[in-house]
Amino acid sequence: MCTDGCKRLQRGRGSRGLSRVVLVALLVFLGLVPVTVRAEEPEGAVEPTLAEETEGAAEPTLIDGWREVLMFGLDNEVIELLSVLRDQRERRLFPEIAELFDQSVNPRLRQRVLEFFTTMEYPDGEPAALVVLEAYREVPTDLLLAAIRYVSLVVTHPQEETRAALREVAEGTQITAAETAIRALGRRGGEEEIGPLVQRLSDRRAPSPIRAAVILALGDLRATEAVDELLRIAGDTVEESTTRQFAADSLGRIGDEQAIPLLMELAVGSDTMLRAYAVNALGAFRDDEVERIIVNSLRDSFWRVRVAALEAVARHDMDSAIPVVQFRAQRDPEPRVRTEAIRSLAQMSDPRARTFLHELVLGERNPEAMRITALQRLADNDWRATVPLFEQIVETEHGKPQSRMLDQVGRIISTSDEAVPHAIYERFLDHPNFIMQIYGIRAAGRHGISALRERVSKMTDAPHHQAVRRAATDALERM
């Protein structure tokens, strides 16, 4: 069953209202200050001002600075830089990072590179992952797991050499690596994987994690050959509860209608976690009685069941459930359920769902965290329909000294590949807070808005903040 950045600006005294700690954190997020700071200073040293810390001789462009860290930086500096590049969704340095992986002998650094490739969905990292997989007996477990997960999550059609290496790891004695490799074979393997996995499923002496991984892999492979055994496992009260939960999940993934009666029975049973898995599995089937159980599960006393029901409602695009989903978004006692309700509404096609979320975002008396969540989910699901919300937020929040909503708009537009109307970029560029200016600069550069080139070029010199000047120089390279 599926489950799925910068902290709030602190209010403070003075016209700018930003504490030094928060400011440094924001700048690290934006990639505009060094990723390491001194742990100690001489006793009695005078703390430099922010201007003294950031002003100075002309520096290389931001991308050049990052490239130098990749080429010459300490391993821990490179690891921290990878986090910055990940947060920035920075894709221009893939070749340098791939070369760094080939040259490095530091397992932790190589692990972080593969994790970066996974998060960024870098398509050409299979050779790097294969190097690790073929040396699975010698490499640290964390590095091996990073390689397996990269293949599992990013490589749509692995080479036969990669699949063969995964099979070897899956047969190994390292339980965590073996179960992760089995899951990868389920996601990226073909029909040739089904027979051996069904055979392993019948081995009741296998460790529980291995058996669970086999069950889930068969679900990913939509293996109808496993339905009878999965039905037996899911309905057998002697089996471990976790094993039964995974069997129910895989029955839903396979989608064989033979499973509906048992899943409906489990969805109203006494085992709370098994109820949640069964409700989630029922979301794969279209049936009036199934939908009735899903809607009733929105009132279940166990919050995970309600989350599973909300996921199923979104999958079915169940218009009839919108009123109760709206209620869950506003009134559910569990924050995770409220968040899932907002996510579900953002995925639904009924205009009532979008109207509700738009009103939630624009309602200044609504909890700020809910407004931010709703705005992010709307942007994820329908960018074009969310742009008018951006415009209204910019208009109403621009004059406020601190605004989390405006900050969220800045984060979204500066990390998305989708463009916005020019007026939005300009309002951020004109904002008195230099962090907001940087959001506008980064967005304009990311989207290649050449019409703003002259405007941004004026921000590369004094009296603009050094961080603004560096961001502007970098943005001009993209325009």
Image (cartoon, grey):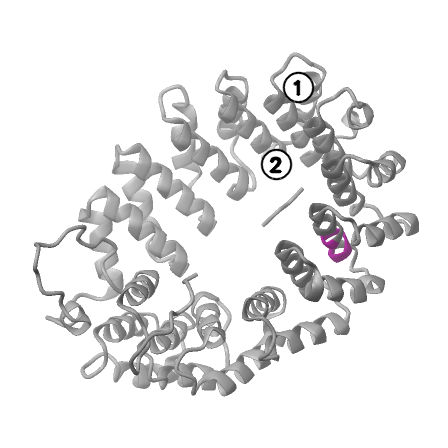
Q: Tell me the amino acid under the disc marked 1.
A: Pro
Disc on res. 196: 1
The answer to whether residue 123 is seen in the rendering is: no
Q: Which residues are magenta?
A: 310-314
Rendered residue at 50%/87% (across/down): 395
Residue 401 covered by magenta stretch: no
Count of numbered labels shown in the rendering: 2
The answer to whether residue 68 is seen in the rendering is: yes
- The vertical placement of 333 against 194, above or below, is below
Chief secondary structure of the magenta portion: helix
Residue 311 covered by magenta stretch: yes
Q: Tell me the amino acid under the disc marked 2.
A: Arg
Q: Position of residue 106 (x, y in %)?
A: 27, 34
Q: From this viewpoint, which residue is outermost toward the right?
A: 289
Q: Position of residue 214 (x, y in %)?
A: 65, 25
**Residue at label 2?**
187
